[in-house]
Image (cartoon, grey):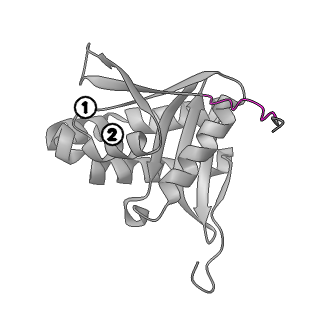
Amino acid sequence: MPAGQHRPLVRPARAEDLDALQALARRTIGTCYRGFLGDEAVDWFLGSGASDAHVRTHVERGGTYRLDLDGRLVGVSVLDGSTVDLMMVDPDHHRRGLGRLLLRHAEDTLLAVHPVIRLETFPDNTAARSFYEACGWVLAERLEGDGPAKLVYTKTATRTAPHTATKA
């Protein structure tokens, strides 16, 4: 890590984090989702306030985490039951290992309670799909319905068998 740079920190989000978390979600959706959802859908979604409402609801309920680097918010995850409901890293901080760190935190938190965990992504979000697959997530199913299709990925807790010594 370069001199003067601190380790990333994941911590539970608090009510006073709400504005910054909502801004991060809007910025990430506005920057990263246009290529696979289109401008019209992204503009409608952001303009509807649905993104802000989603983040607000989860901050109020708990299970929302923020990722800070050098005291600055760079990522957010929302855990809901056995699901990674939302995970975003500021577009200016992509490809630096921060998404992997945030996802690992989510996995460790959820797998401590649930034997199988899940997340959803859009079929055309090839960057996210590649990332999840590289992190050991397995494509489980395709969801069709109102709105864009989604893919469900799952991950199962891996248990290693205890090592037993054998006599020669």
Please tell me which of labels 1 and 2 falls first in the chain. Answer: 1
Extreme top residue here?
145
Q: Is residue 156 above or below residue 107?
A: above
Residue sitting nearer the eye, 39 or 131: 131
Left-right relation of 50 to 164: left
**Residue 129 - label:** 2
- Residue 62 at least partly seen: no
Q: Secondary structure at mark 1?
A: loop
Q: Is residue 163 found inside the magenta-colored segment of the image?
A: yes
Q: What number of labels is visible?
A: 2
Residue sitting nearer the eye, 157 or 141: 157
- Examine the image and state in which quarter residue 151 appears: top left
Question: Which residues are the magenta region?
Answer: 157-164
Residue 52 place in picture, x, y as percent: 45, 39
Distance, label 1 to label 2, CA atoms, is 8 Å
Left-right relation of 143 to 108: left
Asked if disc 1 and disc 2 are in contact, CB closer than 8 Å, the reply is yes
- Examine the image and state in which quarter residue 132 appears: top left
Q: Amino acid at mark 2?
A: Arg
Q: Which residue is mark 1?
A: 123
Magenta segment, prevailing SS (helix, strand or loop): loop
Q: Residue at x 48, y 47 (%)?
A: 22
How busy is the neighbourhood of tag 1: few (under 14 within 10 Å), some, or many (20 plus)? some
Q: Residue at x 47, y 38 (%)?
A: 136
